Amino acid sequence: MTNLVVAQRRTIAVLSVGQVLGGISFGATVSLGAVLAAQISGDDALSGLASAAITLGTALTAVPLAALARARGRRPALATGMAVSLVGVGVVVAAVAGGAFVPLLVGFVLIGAGQAANLQSRFAATDLATDASRGLRPVDRGLDHHGRRRSRP
């Protein structure tokens, strides 16, 4: 196996695990965010603002992260988005501890950067594609659904 094939397989495995974990954590964040927003604000009608804040944060950071990826590479952009999200988690924890609603929403906006990075990480798999395989589905390259060579009938 060539180094490129090994790197591609490792990258796909890491990205796949990241997508699964990111999806689970995003779902939990949105659900828990609604509960926290209702509890901190004292008004169930405001519970949707947590999800709205995450979506706003995702929208606000998607283009800057893409620009950073273009200028410096995908890895720094994804790391930056995740780091901003981690800061957001800290803000949310502090806001919950202090019972402060507006900082809670600010924290959720920052968490949106992690969602933007997670969504952009889906495209990282294309970085290692060769000219011969770029844009082809695995079946078009003679591979089965596990990425192994199919035997020809």
Image (cartoon, grey):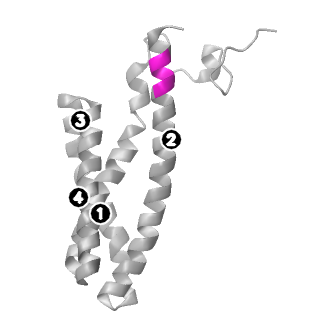
Residue at 43% over, 38% down: 122
Asked which quadrant contains residue 72, the reply is top left
Q: Is residue 3 left or right of residue 60?
A: right
- The residue singled out by tag 3 in the image is 76
Can you see residue 4?
yes
Relative to residue 146, is residue 49 depicted above or below?
below
**Pointers 4 and 2 in contact (C-beta within 8 Å):** no
Residue 91 within the magenta-colored segment of the rendering: no
Residue 7 within the magenta-colored segment of the rendering: yes
Q: Quadrant of the N terminus?
A: top right
Kindly report the distance in space between the C-alpha atoms of the residues bearing marks 3 and 4.
16 Å
Q: Amino acid at mark 2?
A: Val
- The residue singled out by tag 1 in the image is 89
- The residue singled out by tag 4 in the image is 87
Q: Amino acid at mark 3?
A: Pro
Q: How many marks?
A: 4
Q: Amino acid at mark 4?
A: Val
Asked which quadrant contains residue 145, the reply is top right
Q: Amino acid at mark 1?
A: Val
- SS majority, magenta: helix
Kindly report the distance in space between the C-alpha atoms of the residues bearing marks 1 and 3.
20 Å
- The residue singled out by tag 2 in the image is 17
Residue at 25% over, 49% down: 83
Q: Is residue 87 left or right of residue 1?
A: left
Earlier along the polypeptide chain: callout 3 or callout 4? 3
Kindly report the distance in space between the C-alpha atoms of the residues bearing marks 4 and 2.
22 Å
Can you see residue 134?
no
